[in-house]
Image (cartoon, rainbow, N blue to C red):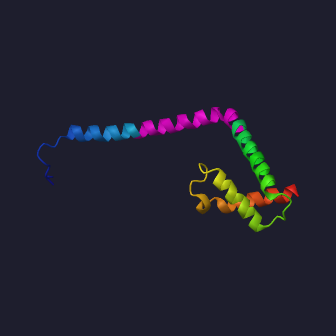
Amino acid sequence: MNEKRPKGWDWRAELGRHEGRAAHEAFNDQMSVLRFVIKLVTLPVRVPLYVRRIILRRRDMIRFAQERSMDRLVSDELAREVSLQWVKAHPRRYPLGEYDPRLPKLQRTFEGMMRRQR
């Protein structure tokens, strides 16, 4: 029944630590809600900018693929070659180079673009 407390144990300090943790968790919850509201309010500005960035990137990719393919038959090898050249031209976006895990998706994207351009 009688718990052994270490010497110098203060129940007020323990209570303060628990209250501090609870206050910190409540603050984190409030900040999460605030971040969500800010993202929701700025959505009409962020979405058009995001879409514009994607459209410009796609245009660059199409131009890049057209320059590299030059009336060659569209194949897996050509798509792989063009995608590797794209990766080498954009090392910041693909830091792992030819070993980047996003390379197969990029290859499929280039292959689809080249097939649509024919």
**Residue 27: horizontal and vertical position, in percent?**
43, 36
Q: Please report the residue visible at 27 percent of the width from the left and 37 percent of the height from the top.
A: 16
Q: Quadrant of residue 102?
A: bottom right
Residue name at image x 72 percent, y 62 percent: 81
For the N terminus, which image quadrant? bottom left
Please tell me how many numbered marks the rendered image carries: 0
Q: Could you say where residue 107 lies in the image, as x and y percent from the top left?
A: 71, 61
Front residue of 117/36: it is 117
Identify which residue, 35 or 52, lies in the foreground: 52
Q: Which residues are magenta?
A: 25-47
Question: Compared to 57, does 88 lie above or below?
Answer: below
Q: Is residue 61 above or below residue 51?
A: below
Percent position (x, y) of residue 89? 66, 51
**Does residue 15 appear to the left or right of 1 in the view shown?**
right
Examine the image and state in which quarter residue 84 appears. Answer: bottom right
Relative to 44, residue 105 above or below:
below
Q: Looking at the image, which residue sits at the far right?
A: 118
Q: Is residue 47 left or right of residue 97?
A: right
Decide if residue 61 is on the left or right side of residue 117: left
Q: Residue at x 73, y 41 (%)?
A: 51
Q: Which quadrant of the rendered structure holds the C terminus? A: bottom right
x then y, percent, for residue 99? 59, 62
For residue 115, which quarter of the picture? bottom right
Q: Does residue 44 show up magenta in the picture? A: yes
Please give left or right for residue 91 compared with residue 2 in the image.
right
Q: Main secondary structure of the magenta part?
A: helix
67 in relation to 36, above or below: below
Q: Residue at x 76, y 67 (%)?
A: 76
